[in-house]
C-alpha cells in the first residue's frame, strides 16, 4: 500500500513549475537586454557583436528577435501578465501582434496563467464575419458546350 502522506499535491508541482517558468522568463529578458545593449554599444554588424554571437552560439536572427523583446514597451508595461511564458519565442510572438490582437491576448490571460504560443496564435486569428449569402445550388456546364455555342443565355436562364 502506498503511503499517501509522503506524496506531493498536484498544486505544489504546479507551483514549482510556474516558479521555474517565471525564473526562465526573467533570464530570457536579461539575455534579450544584454543583446540589446551590445547592439547599441557595438552595432549588430560589428566584429564585437559577431564575436558575442559566436561565443554564445546564437544566430543573428535569434539575437535580433531577442532585441525586439527587450525593446517592447508593451511587454514592459504588462510585465506581470507575461511573467510566465513557455519560451522566449512566445515573448517574441507577442511583439509581433497588432494592437487589436494584443488586447485580445490580454483579455484571454487570467491572473497567474502561463502564456503559451497557442494563446498567442489564437489572439492572432482574425474574427471572421459571417457571410449573409448562402450557396443554394451550383451549376456545372460542359466547357466544350460553351466553346461550341451549344449552351446560350436561354439555356442559362432555364
Image (spheres, grey):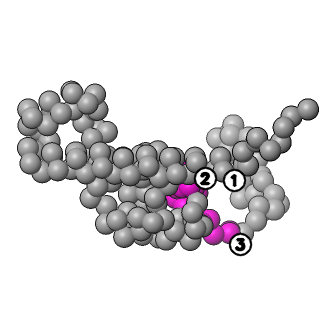
| In the depicted structure, whether residue 124 falls above or below residue 2 | below
> Which circle, 2 or 3, is nearer the viewer?
2
Tell me the residue at 12%/51% (across/down).
40
Residue 93 magenta: no
Q: Residues within 10 Å of mark 1 (few under 14, many from 20)?
A: few
* Left or right of residue 1: residue 144: left
Q: Are marks 2 and 3 in contact (CB under 8 Å)?
A: no
Report if residue 9 is visible in the image. yes
Residue 122 magenta: yes
x, y percentage for residue 117?
A: 53, 49
Tell me the residue at 49%/71% (across/down).
103
Report if residue 93 is visible in the image. no
Query: In whole angstroms, how far apart are the C-alphas of marks 2 and 3?
Result: 48 Å
Query: In whole angstroms, how far apart are the C-alphas of marks 3 and 1?
Result: 48 Å
Pick whichever, 33 or 103, lies toward us.
33
At mark 2, the secondary structure is: helix
At mark 1, the secondary structure is: helix
Tell me the residue at 17%/50% (across/down).
37
Quadrant for the C terminus in the image: bottom right
Residue marked by disc 3: 132
x, y percentage for residue 51?
A: 14, 30
User: Looking at the image, is mark 3 or mark 1 earlier in the sequence?
Assistant: 1
x, y percentage for residue 133?
A: 72, 69
Query: Which quarter of the figure has residue 148?
Result: top right
Pick whichever, 136 or 88, lies toward us.
88
Residue 11 — which label? 1
Q: Residues within 10 Å of mark 2 (few under 14, many from 20)?
A: few
Magenta residues (range): 114-131
Amino acid at each position: 500500500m502506498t503511503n499517501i502522506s509522503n506524496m506531493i499535491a498536484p498544486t505544489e508541482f504546479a507551483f514549482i513549475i510556474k516558479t521555474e517558468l517565471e525564473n526562465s522568463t526573467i533570464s530570457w529578458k536579461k539575455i534579450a537586454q544584454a543583446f540589446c545593449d551590445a547592439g547599441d554599444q557595438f552595432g549588430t554588424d560589428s566584429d564585437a557583436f559577431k564575436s558575442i554571437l559566436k561565443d554564445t552560439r546564437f544566430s543573428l536572427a535569434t539575437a535580433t528577435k531577442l532585441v525586439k523583446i527587450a525593446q517592447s514597451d508593451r511587454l514592459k508595461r504588462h510585465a506581470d501578465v507575461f511573467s510566465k511564458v513557455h519560451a522566449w519565442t512566445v515573448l517574441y510572438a507577442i511583439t509581433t501582434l497588432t494592437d487589436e490582437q494584443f488586447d485580445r491576448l490580454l483579455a484571454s490571460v487570467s491572473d497567474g496563467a502561463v502564456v503559451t504560443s497557442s494563446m498567442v496564435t489564437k489572439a492572432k486569428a482574425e474574427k471572421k464575419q459571417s457571410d449573409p449569402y448562402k450557396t443554394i445550388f451550383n451549376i456545372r456546364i460542359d466547357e466544350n458546350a460553351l466553346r461550341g455555342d451549344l449552351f446560350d443565355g436561354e439555356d442559362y436562364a432555364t
